[in-house]
């Protein structure tokens, strides 16, 4: 399964979502509430994320990051041993030093 990270800024927080594309071409999004949303294709999952004002993390440059309120080199997608732990890390506060 291929995974990519997406993020959005909401007030003083970064909100993450993980897009997983299965070998068959279907996709699922793990959101910050722990919901797994299923899609018929990667394109439809990407469209839903874009509609929700998320941005692909691997496509963000320094000016995009600044506009969203963080320094690009100081933010990384969350990681954890399980999806349950991961969900707890998918909303991150923006700090003055970020």
Image: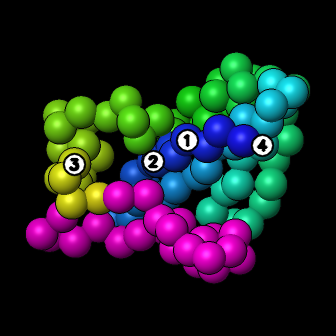
Write the residue at 63% across / 63% down: 32
Element assignment for label 4:
strand
The numbered mark at residue 28 is: 4
On screen, 46 above or below 91?
Answer: above
Residue 21 left/right relative to 74? right
Residue 83 left/right relative to 57? right
Residue 93 in sight: yes
How far apart are the alpha carbons under marks 3 and 2? 13 Å
On screen, 59 above or below 37?
Answer: above
* Residue 77 on the magenta span: yes
Residue 6 left/right relative to 70? right
- The residue carrying mark 3 is 72
The numbered mark at residue 4 is: 1
Element assignment for label 3:
helix
How far apart are the alpha carbons under marks 1 and 4? 11 Å
The numbered mark at residue 8 is: 2
Q: How would you rate the neighbour count of disc 2 (Cα within 10 Å): few for under 14, some for 14-19, many for 20 or more?
A: many
Which residue is most to the top? Answer: 43
């Amino acid at each position: 399964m291929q995974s990519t990270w997406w993020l959005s800024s909401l007030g003083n927080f970064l909100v993450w979502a993980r897009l997983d594309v299965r070998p068959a071409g279907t996709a699922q999004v793990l959101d910050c509430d722990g919901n797994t949303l299923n899609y018929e294709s990667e394109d439809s999952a990407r469209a839903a994320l874009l509609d929700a004002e998320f941005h692909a993390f691997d496509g963000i440059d320094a000016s995009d990051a600044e506009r969203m309120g963080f320094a690009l080199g100081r933010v990384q997608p969350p990681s954890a041993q399980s999806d349950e732990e991961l969900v707890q890390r998918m909303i991150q506060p923006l700090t003055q030093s970020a």
